Amino acid sequence: MRIHRFVILLSLALGPAGGGDTWAQTRSCIVDEMQIRLLSPSNGAAGVTTTPTLDWEDVPWAMFYDVQVCTDSFCLNVIRSVTGLTASQWTVSPPLEPGQTYYWQVRASDPWCETWSEVWSFTTLAYILTVNRVPVTGGTVTSSPAGIDCGTTCSASFGPGTTVTLTATPAGGWQLAGWAGCDSTNSTQCMVTMNADRAVQVNFSCIPVGTPSLLSPANGLAGVSTTPLLDWSDIAEAAFYEVQVCADSACGTVVRSQTGLTASQWAVSPALAFGTTYYWRVRAASACTTGVWTAPWIFTTQPPPSHTLTVIKNEAIGGTVTSSPAGIDCGTTCSASFVDGTTVTLTATPAGGWQFGSWTGCDTTNGNQCAVTMTSSGDRTITANFTTCPGKPWSWGAYDWLSCPALTLTDISNVVMSMAARGFRGFRTFINAYFGPYSLV
């Protein structure tokens, strides 16, 4: 190696010496035209250890050396460095990342001058570790040292001799079934020493889902709300529940259902029918499997709300009132219960010697008919008003056979009893009206 010597004269004023003259001391700074010669690892080398020993030629005039390891060829980003080395080599510490390209340079220094060598590069050795999940939805795997988060990153590079610990975390509803390709395992962990590219498989399996116990409404219960709160026991491994309300015990006809319930109860919606028998069942499910249905329980909804309709006649013997739908036959049965929302039509039929007069309390009327719609507002009372026909048997004058119905023997008996109560004159008037003008003896 050819050495060029450049002499830099430094004049040091040391004061007068004989006759006032000054004298100068000179010192030379030796600069290698080729700078420092790097030796190893060779420029562009691959498969270099993560703790390489950097080596370069000795420089006789060097008092010490400085070294830099960088991530770019201009050494703007220095990640490892050392100063004041007296030997012409250095083992990089702490270790570099595997599978990465690095750049390095050296300079020799003395008190008078220093200059950097050229920049060389090398790439560290790395082995690739790959994780395969079966199935991919079964869980995640992470590594120590960091690099794998699978999840999303299922392969990474690690330096030779590195022992990587993989940890599996099952997803909800899954459990770890086993490892393949590990050097050793410990429960959820797999240990791999990287001396070549490696592949590891982790297997997950579904956790079996239990069957809930039905709680309420009690099996066979009657009078249940039409929007009952169905309740059952929790299942620890369940992610959600499915419920069915059916018209038959085999659930061939499902009338209400709900899936994806995270709570262990459900208020049936929309409302069920009144006075109807239903069957219900539940099953639990996880992210990967569905359990079996419970045996169905049975309940009967409450009867529909109803209120009482009562008919009053102003004259007990004036006639009868009947209803449609059936229930009232007044005569004898003058009140009955009807389901809310039912429109009841009452029909008044006068007795002989009477005629229908009017209604009180109806929603609408049409002659001798009265319409009433039963509602939740309460019971209803209707009055049917009957009046006696013109020329009634106990008054003076002839009976009006055209305006009033014909008298039956029962009517005559009723009138006789009524007139007898009024006195002899009334009774005699009745006899004269119906049997001719003769006197009783």
Image: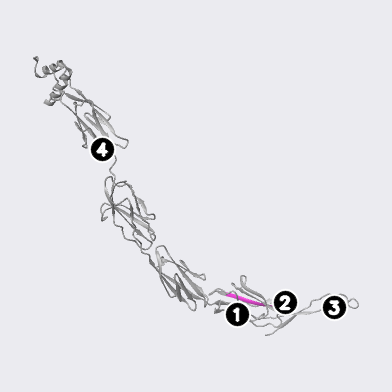
- On screen, residue 355 versus residue 262, left or right, reads left
Q: Residues within 10 Å of mark 2 (few under 14, many from 20)?
A: few
Name the image colouring. one colour
Q: Nearer the viewer, mark 2 or mark 1?
A: 1
Q: Nearer the viewer, residue 433 or 367?
A: 433
Mark 1 or 3, nearer chain start: 3
Secondary-structure class at tag 2? loop
Q: How many marks?
A: 4
Say which residue label 1 marks.
53
**As drawn, 349 above or below 153:** above
Say which residue label 4 marks.
338
Secondary-structure class at tag 1? strand
Q: Nearer the viewer, mark 1 or mark 4?
A: 4
**As drawn, 368 above or below 270:** above
Say which residue label 3 marks.
23
Q: Position of residue 61 (x, y in %)?
A: 71, 82
Say which residue label 2 marks.
113
Q: Which residues make up the magenta segment? A: 102-112
Q: Is residue 391 magenta?
A: no
Alpha-carbon span between mark 1 and mark 4: 102 Å
Q: Nearer the viewer, residue 417 or 7?
A: 417
Label 2 is placed on what type of residue? Cys
